[in-house]
Image: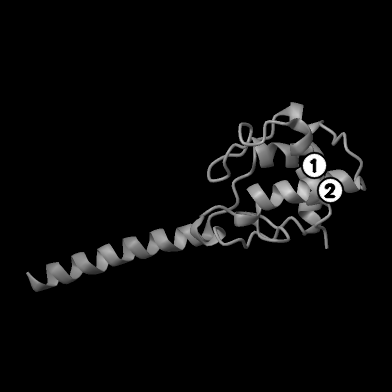
Amino acid sequence: MRKLKMSVIVSCTLVLLSFVLMSFVQEKKPWDIPAKYQSMKNPQAADDAEMIKIGKMNYSRHCKSCHGNIGQGNGPKARSLDADLGDFTSAEFQASKDGVIYYQSFIGRDEMPNFEKKIPDDEDRWAIVTYIRTLKK
């Protein structure tokens, strides 16, 4: 009886440990970006100071709590999320097409919420994309 209890405890511990390890090893789930967004271009100039200012203001209001002050995915809410928040300053992220960033930022998925209702104005959405582009290293 004692051996059976010990065997059950060891088995349960191993199962639990395997789930914990699997959560650390999971690969990034690729985004399925519709073709419409793949070809979208930001209508705002990359150096439009007014749009960058508006984008920064909206980023601070809607994005900073998860993505951090400079977009490195280290905001105060980031610790409570399982999602990979990315690093907006990385060359890999900055190489993303405008429409891809737009889709990921406003349509969202999983723990990234949909912001279409919170930020209904398309110009404000593009202003955030314009601001995010200034975060590159």
Lateral position of residue 6 relative to residue 125, left or right: left
Lateral position of residue 47 relative to residue 86, left or right: right
Element carrying mark 2: helix
Dots 2, 1 in contact, CB < 8 A: yes
The residue depicted at 39 percent of the width and 58 percent of the height is 19
- Per the rendering, the mark at residue 52 is 2
| Residue 87, picture quadrant | bottom right
* Residue type for callout 2: Ile
* Residue type for callout 1: Ala
Q: Position of residue 93 (x, y in %)?
A: 76, 52
- Residue 51 sits above or below residue 10 on the image: above
The residue depicted at 55 percent of the width and 52 percent of the height is 83
Q: Position of residue 108 (x, y in %)?
A: 61, 39
Q: Position of residue 102 (x, y in %)?
A: 73, 38
- Residue 52 sits above or below residue 106 on the image: below
How does the figure colour the protein chain or chains? Answer: one colour
- Per the rendering, the mark at residue 127 is 1
Element carrying mark 1: helix
Q: Can the viewer see residue 92 in this picture?
A: yes
The residue depicted at 42 percent of the width and 62 percent of the height is 20
- Residue 29 sits above or below residue 72 on the image: above
The residue depicted at 64 percent of the width and 47 percent of the height is 62
Q: Real-space Cα distance between discs 2 and 1? A: 6 Å
Lateral position of residue 129 relative to residue 113, left or right: right
